[in-house]
Image (cartoon, grey):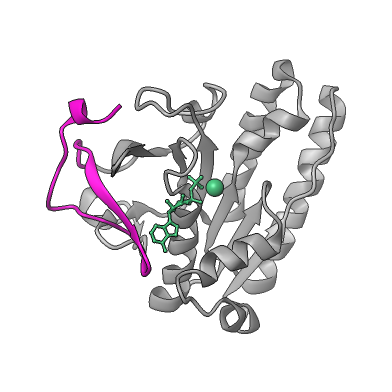
Amino acid sequence: MVERIKSGIPGLDELTFGGIPKGSNILVSGGTGTGKTIFCTQYLYNGAIEYGEPGLFVTLEGNVKDISWNMENFQWDIKKLQDQNMLTIYRLNLSAIDDLETVQKRIDEQLDEIAKEIEEINAKRLVIDSTTVFGAYFNPSILRTTLFQFTDKLKTLGCTTFLTSETAPTKNVLSAYGVEEFVVDGIINLQFTPPNRSIFIRKMRGTDHDKSPHPLIINSKGISVNSKDSMLWESIK
Ligand SMILES: Nc1ncnc2c1ncn2[C@@H]1O[C@H](COP(=O)(O)OP(=O)(O)O)[C@@H](O)[C@H]1O
Ligand SMILES: [Mg+2]
């Protein structure tokens, strides 16, 4: 029997028939504004509040303040969680590199930092937002290797990890570089075909899962999935 974790995102666990396999790397992909960052912060916030699991949010694109502000938008008391060592927001610092040897070293350094932060609060949940930023630092020929190494090593850290990837705004594109989807255990795709938001599970190793797109709701309380209603694939761009 595969061990699972409760995602903390209302409605989502119904789509995986009980939760996400523990220890997986899950890609959360979608176009800009589809709710990826909110989805991931909700995973950490409810993980801490409802399931007592500490979480680490690693941002590659925003500063720490932006992320806190984003979470406070939903009236979540982030400061309290941070004070209780239930949440850490960490800004990953990369610099442009173009030879493989240095990449290897830099990835190792950054993963050591992430590992340290995980250890400090005994984090069980990890978010990397977003992997698309890697493209700004690594040249395309080594990007593939970089992403492989990075996600491979994340596996050794003992967390269940959500990684985001920003895609073109169409349902058939699953990642920014066409690599990310092959190195993860699961893919959750978010779509925004105005005015409708949707979510569907493209892949989830170790469990059966729902195959239809479902309505996704973002409001003042955060993000949730309407698992009871499904949407037509044709209705999504
Ligand atoms: N309080 C809210 N109520 C309704 N929608 C919101 C609220 N806060 C943010 N949003 C929606 O969420 C979007 C941002 O989601 P975000 O997770 O940052 O997207 P992504 O990371 O995929 O680019 C905003 O463009 C807005 O449409
Ligand atoms: Mg985002």
Residue 47 image position (x, y, % from top left): 44, 69
Q: Is residue 22 above or below residue 202?
A: below
Q: Is 56 positioned to the left or the right of 3 in the image?
A: right
In front: 179, or 69? 69
What's the magenta region?
A: 210-237
Queried whether the magenta region covers residue 213, the answer comes back as yes
Q: Residue at x 69, y 34 (%)?
A: 134
Residue 28 image-quadrant placement: top left
Quadrant for the C terminus in the image: top left
Queried whether the magenta region covers residue 162, the answer comes back as no
Q: Residue at x 20, y 41 (%)?
A: 210
Residue 32 image position (x, y, % from top left): 49, 39
Residue 81 image position (x, y, % from top left): 57, 79
Residue 126 image-quadrant placement: bottom right
Q: Is 31 positioned to the left or the right of 179 in the image?
A: left
Q: Is residue 51 above or below residue 41?
A: below
**Residue 144 in view here:** yes
In front: 200, or 167? 167
Outermost residue, front side:
195
Q: Is residue 44 above or below residue 156?
A: below
**Residue 18 in view here:** no
Q: Residue at x 77, y 48 (%)?
A: 110
Residue 14 image position (x, y, % from top left): 21, 55
